[in-house]
Image: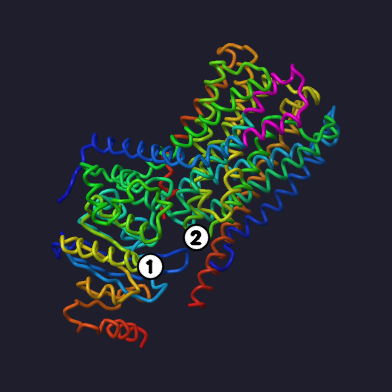
Amino acid sequence: MVEKKSPAVKSGNFIKAVLAITWKDLAAELRSRELISAMLVFAMLVILIFNFALKLDAKTRLTATSGILWVTFTFAGTLGLNRSMAVEKDRGCLDGLLLAPVDRSSIYFGKLLSNLAFMFIVEAIVLPLYSLLYNINLFNPGLLLVILLGSIGYIAIGTMLAAMAVQTRTRDVMLPILLFPVVIPVIVAAVEASGGFLQGLNIAEVRYWINLLLVYDIIFIAIAFMVFDYVVEE
Amino acid sequence: MNEESGSMIEVRKLVKRFGMKTILRGLDFRVGQGEFVALLGPNGAGKTTFLRILSSLSRPSLGEVRIAGYTLPYQDVQVRQKLGVVSHMPLLYGDLTAEENLRFFGQMYNVNNINPRIGEVLDLIGLTHRRRDLVRTFSRGMQQRLAIGRAVLHDPEVMLFDEPHTGLDQDACDMLDKVLRDVAARGRTVVMTSHDLGRVEELATRFDVLSKGVISATSRKSEIKSGNILTFYKNSLAAQNG
Amino acid sequence: MNKKPVALLVLDILSLVFLVVATYLALFFAPMEANMGNVQKVFYFHVANAWVGMLGFIAAGVAGIVYLRSQDPKWDIVEVAAVEISLVFFLIAIVLGSIWAKPAWNTWWTWEPRLTTAAITEMIYLAYFMLRNGIEDPNRRARFSAVYTLVGSVSVPITFMAIRLFRTIHPVVIGTQSAQTQGGFNMTPDMKLAFFFSLFAFTVIFIDLFWHRIRLGILANKVEELKLKVME
């Protein structure tokens, strides 16, 4: 019996698969909370170290904040990306996903969404904490926009590179080495735009950075989507 | 198109290379609907590689593979819908319950009426009483049982088993055999690799030997006297070497 | 493909000849620059090496895409050759840049966009080789390398634009004004001759080395094949 699915059904399956994978990751993490607690603790430690490493007076603290925040998110993000992929690799679960009758890129998008969710959760906790510790108001809509766009760019390319890194011998160290050089545009743009918003510039003045982030996000989601097959197939 | 209509699995001149090493060398293999093929062979012969190609996890270097009328690797999505695969790794998520695992795979395989179906499958594998327990608390035997449940969830026409009895205790083995008998009784096509000749003897309708990258011998069960499978196997290896 | 082809031999000789001529033009023929003195002559080689680095960068990107589409392992060899050459020549360019910068502007390094982008590209290349080192299966190694090359090829231009934007907003404080502009001097016709000939000579050198390296890769593969045949 030959089953031909109509395009509408096919895309329905795709979205269903993506959401199933995202939900599976979130549900599993809710139970163990290993990933998020590791990311959070690490993030707090990084901020602590910065507190002693950079002796910031009240004025320089304002300009350094965006840099500190993004270094923190970058490093903590690596932990999350690594863990999220390692789970699939260790118990052979990736094979289970690859056996499913869906487009391989649904695995990418499912993982992208769950990794993004983890990153947002960590950021949502770090921001208020940082605000309290340094008496800086971080509830700035512009800043939140930058964090949104920057995280998307970072996780978009990070998810794909994590899928590659987890299949190499030097798994854990491989991801930062691959990721950091290619994610520099995101860091530069995010730090500049964040700093701009914190110093009270309006959106027109930082729009080049926002545009850069948008362009990066779109390009790299597209690239990852197109080449993800090559990364997981054998 | 198919000279042999009713061929569920059709493999022609399959070659698989890893870098410079050739594992499968022009392998031919044909399985009709409802057959239960026991695939025997020495370690390292390429049985697992072959099964990975059949399950679409690995791509052929050369040659043709068709399953249920669909060609690999181009129509891999359609092929996978018709396949149920059990390997020696359970492919389950430890932090989810048995029920959640089945629900997840049910969604990935687009299973209709998923809740009653989950109940049916849990009954079949005897894990109804542990449905709300986390899989990481399961013994290896129970995990393998659940893995089988996952494989039959979408009622696939073709089932592939790679050494499924590995590491299972007696209870789990019996449960696995029960499922295998059920699957066979419903006319599904099965290819199973195994080291345990005793187990496959009862269930299989056909015995093939994969050695040195090709199928070196194949024989219907009716053609071998009972208890002589070991002899058949050893003879086929000797014939290939000699 | 055992004997070196005649064309390659000719190219070898031409490369050597052109290199000598370019050196003569740069060191003796071109006039001395008014402000910076003789050290400015490093410029002729600095830009030429960076140019070769760029050629290698583009070649690697193209090879990666072609490999992904064709799955032909020869393109993996081409890609590795391109990355190796680009790595070495960018390194030379960076070092020459430092040699030029210190006497001219009293600093070993400036964070100007091109230099910084070249340094980041070097990091990507190093990551590339570490990636290849960590993968046993040749097919997977080639695929992953090609994917990473693609990612790098797209990310580096964006990085360059980002840093340039960064620099227009934060003008550099250290170093003189000329550290940021194109060499900071006007070229006389003689200088232009030396400059463009240098570019030409190094392009020929690039093709020569590229060809050699690809041959080397193919021969190395043959050796592996023969090894396996003997072992079976």
The residues bearing labels 1 and 2 have C-alpha atoms spaced at a distance of 27 Å
Within the image, what quadrant is residue C178 found in?
Answer: top right
**Chain letter belonging to callout 1:** B
Residue drawn at 63 percent across, 17 percent down:
A196
Residue drawn at 57 percent across, 22 percent down:
A209
Residue drawn at 57 percent across, 30 percent down:
A186
Q: Secondary structure at mark 1?
A: loop
Nearer to the camera, A34 or A77: A34
Count of marks, rendered view: 2
Q: Quadrant of the C terminus of chain A?
A: bottom left
Image position of A3 with respect to B221: above or below: above
* Amino acid at dot 2: Asp
- Provide the residue designation for mark 2: C137
- Provide the residue designation for mark 1: B166
Looking at this rendering, what residue extends furthest in the bottom direction?
B242
Q: Are marks 1 and 2 in contact (CB under 8 Å)?
A: no
User: Majority secondary structure of the magenta segment?
Assistant: helix
**Magenta segment includes C4:** no
- B24 sits to left or right of A159: left
Image position of A152 with respect to A78: above or below: above
**Chain letter belonging to callout 2:** C
> Residue A136 location in percent, x, y?
65, 17
Q: Which mark identifies residue B229?
A: none
Image position of B46 with respect to C209: above or below: below
Say whether mark 2 and mark 1 are on the same chain: no
Mark toward the viewer: 1 or 2? 1
Nearer to the camera, C93 or C10: C93
- Find the magenta span and give its range: A42-69
How is the model colour-coded?
rainbow
> Residue B77 location in percent, x, y?
29, 48
* Amino acid at dot 1: Thr
